[in-house]
Image: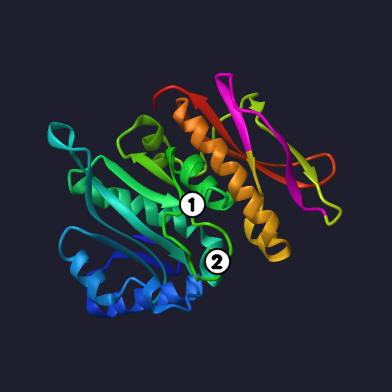
Amino acid sequence: MQATNDIELRICKTWDECVQCEEAQKQIWEMPDFRDVVPASFLVTAAKNGGILIGAFQHGAMVGFAFGVLGSEGTGAARRLKHTSHMLGVLPQARAHGLGAHLKWLQRQVALEQGLDLMTWTYDPLQAVNAQLNLTRLGAIARRYLRDAYGEMTDALNTGIASDRFEVEWFLKHERVSARARALDLTETFPEAAAVFEIDWTAQGLPYIAAAQLPTEERARVEIPADLNQLKARDRALAAEWRAQTRVMFERAFAAGYIAYNVSHWRDASGHARAAYLLRRGDF
């Protein structure tokens, strides 16, 4: 499968491909601790036994990948098989090609060929770009919040604040997902929704939550930082405060029956970059 004219996507099962994936992880996440890396020895075993490793290659070198394993959820008669996607990453020099979406769509195709109809994975709910990919472009939903999912992380992207995560559900045969598979840039209207946070700005131009209220309407808007990485670089304590306040809000909203299903980005009248989730009550 061709993602662009010079980038090829393919299913990976060889030792050399898995070694390349190991090295790609170190570069993408700037991992100082070897324990954070999924080793080639496990990658190759998983890839040959129901796991899915998709690689993106440019001039023979891996520049991105998606990796996951066969999993299940529920018990007894309610138990269902699923694909548990563990990692998705693209090297900085290849991020202008929309590879993240291309990798996920091929991962979906392979999972469907395995007879699966559900894929789950986790991501940091404060990473607005990832949220846009997962919910808006791919059509996944989030209604599960995991505190400190990976403990204290040491890589450059995640260090400094608690490793809370959304676990998203991607219903591979759902009409919403199928529509996005036919048109990767398909988006939904972002309807009026009650804002649960009142946002203000520090003297340095950084966003903070000035007031909060729990959602009560059918739809709710939960704002997040438009650029968490920049916020952490400039004021790590403020980034940690965002984590603490959004943690409480999302946990309560999900417990009350809301799901997160869309993300919006905009600039306000003062020129500030903004981002927010759209939540709605009800099942998916």
Quick check: is 99 in the magenta stretch?
A: no
In this picture, is 11 found above or below 186?
A: below
Q: CA distance from mark 1 to mark 2?
A: 12 Å
| Helix, strand or loop for disc 2 | loop
Say which quadrant the N terminus sits in. bottom left
Say which quadrant the C terminus sits in. top left
Between 52 and 57, the one lying in front of the other is 52
In this picture, is 251 found above or below 151?
A: above
Amino acid type at image mark 1: Asp
Mark 1: give few (<14), some (14-19) or many (20+) Cα within 10 Å.
Answer: many
In the rendered image, residue 41, in percent from the top left (x then y), is placed at: 23, 76
Residue at image position (55%, 72%) is 93
Question: Which range is magenta?
Answer: 205-222
Residue at image position (39%, 37%) is 177
Q: Quadrant of residue 211?
A: top right
Q: Is residue 181 visible?
A: yes
Label for residue 243? none
Label for residue 159? 2
On the picture, is 212 further left or further right than 31? right
In the rendered image, residue 91, in percent from the top left (x then y), is placed at: 49, 70
In the rendered image, residue 254, in percent from the top left (x then y), is placed at: 47, 32
Q: Which residue is mark 1?
A: 164
Amino acid type at image mark 2: Thr
User: Please, which residue is most extreme toward the left here?
Assistant: 77
In this picture, is 17 found above or below 224?
A: below
| Helix, strand or loop for disc 1 | loop
Q: Is residue 60 visible?
A: no
Between 61 and 228, the one lying in front of the other is 228
Residue at image position (64%, 48%) is 242
